[in-house]
Each structure stands twice: as C-alpha cells, then as structure tokens.
Amino acid sequence: MNIQQHARIARIKQFSRYLYLALSGLRYVLWGLWPLFVAAMMFGNKLQINMGEMHMNDVEPSLLQRVLLVVGLSAFMFVAIKITFHFRELIRHFSEGDIFNKVAIDHARKALFNGLMLYGLYVLTVLGSWGWVIQQSSSMSVNVNVDVSFIFALMFFGLMYVLLWALEIGSDLNEESELTI
C-alpha cells in the first residue's frame, strides 16, 4: 500500500477524533439549553418570536400558545440531538478506521433521515408563519415571500444520499473482499 495513503488515513482518523469531541460537546450543550429554552418560553414575561415570515416583538402569549411553542421547540431539539448522536457515532467509526460496516452506515442513514425530519419541521414552520401573516393581515394586500432555499436543501440531501450509497457500496465491497480472502 502507498505510504502517502497511510498518512492521509492517519489525518482522517485524527480529524475524526477532533470532530467526535466537538460533537460530544455540542450534544451536551443541546441537552443543557433545551430546559433553559423551555423555562424561558413558559415563564418569560414577554417573548420575541421570529419564525419565517412571522415577526412578533414583546408579545405575551397565552398558555396554549406557550405550550405550542414549547412542543415545537422540543420537537426541534429532540431531532437535533438525535442527528448529533448518530453523526457522532458515525464519526467515532471513522476515528477508529472502521468506516465500511453496517453499524456506521445505519448511523449515517438515521442521521440523514432525522435531518430530513428537521427540514420538514422547518417547512411546516414556514407554512404556519404564512398562515399567521395572512390571518393577521388587516388589509386586502398580503405579501408572502417565497424562500427558494428548498432548492439548496434538495441538493444537500441529494448529495448526502449519494455519499450514503457510496458507503453502502464500500461496505458491500469490503464484505466481498473479506469472503474472497
């Protein structure tokens, strides 16, 4: 095997260890911020809410609105923590040099699925904010801006699926080579 490839693999493993530690820290930060955000939404006097097209400053929401905000935030945080967990486990396999195995691919698949769920929550928030703007509009003129970032999201998730499929093909080839030897 080429010595240059050994050095490249060592750099990938080292960078993966650093990324694993950063993701571990991010996971703890998310777990710590979640209850703080919930407490701020439930017990705060006035809230400033910016979601999509909906901008509200110094609002005192009702208990039902606060509960709905907490449910939305909790869904977001739960999915974000799951993405962090699965991506962290995938990176752990990379740092150990064990990339092409079924467990690592399963973590990649779950992280990607949860990323799609998180994007779905974002789309629902944007659609809900459009409904809020239309409902709160007192005049006949309604200005709804269309965000085309979904095109970039489709490209990103498409690229991630291509990488997932590459990992799956690599895993299959790895299994075949082990059977051949």
Image (cartoon, grey):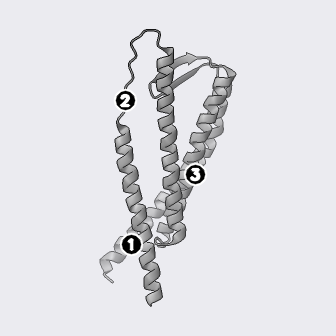
Side of 70 where 128 appears, left or right = left
Side of 3 where 133 appears, left or right = right
Residue 78: x percent and y percent? 60, 45
Residue 146 is labelled as: 2
Decide if residue 159 is in sight here: yes
Towards the viewer: 141 or 15: 141
Decide if residue 25 is in sight here: no
Q: Which residue: 55% across, 16% down?
A: 58
Side of 96 where 32 appears, left or right = right
Number of the front mark, 2 or 3: 2
Query: Label 1, on which residue?
Result: 9
Query: Label 3, on which residue?
Result: 82
Number of the front mark, 2 or 1: 2
Residue 81: x percent and y percent? 58, 49
Side of 181 where 35 appears, left or right = right
Towards the viewer: 18 or 114: 114
The mark that comes first in sequence, 3 or 1, is: 1
Towards the viewer: 160 or 80: 160
| Disc 2 element | loop
The mark that comes first in sequence, 2 or 1, is: 1
Quadrant location, the N terminus: bottom left
Q: Which residue: 54% across, 52% down?
A: 84
Number of the front mark, 3 or 1: 3
Q: Are marks 2 and 1 in contact (CB under 8 Å)?
A: no
Vertically, is 17 above or below 100? above
Farthest-out residue, front = 140
Q: Quadrant of residue 166?
A: bottom left
Q: Which residue: 38% across, 47% down?
A: 154
Farthest-out residue, bottom = 181
Q: Are marks 2 and 3 in contact (CB under 8 Å)?
A: no
CA–CA distance between discs 2 and 1?
A: 44 Å
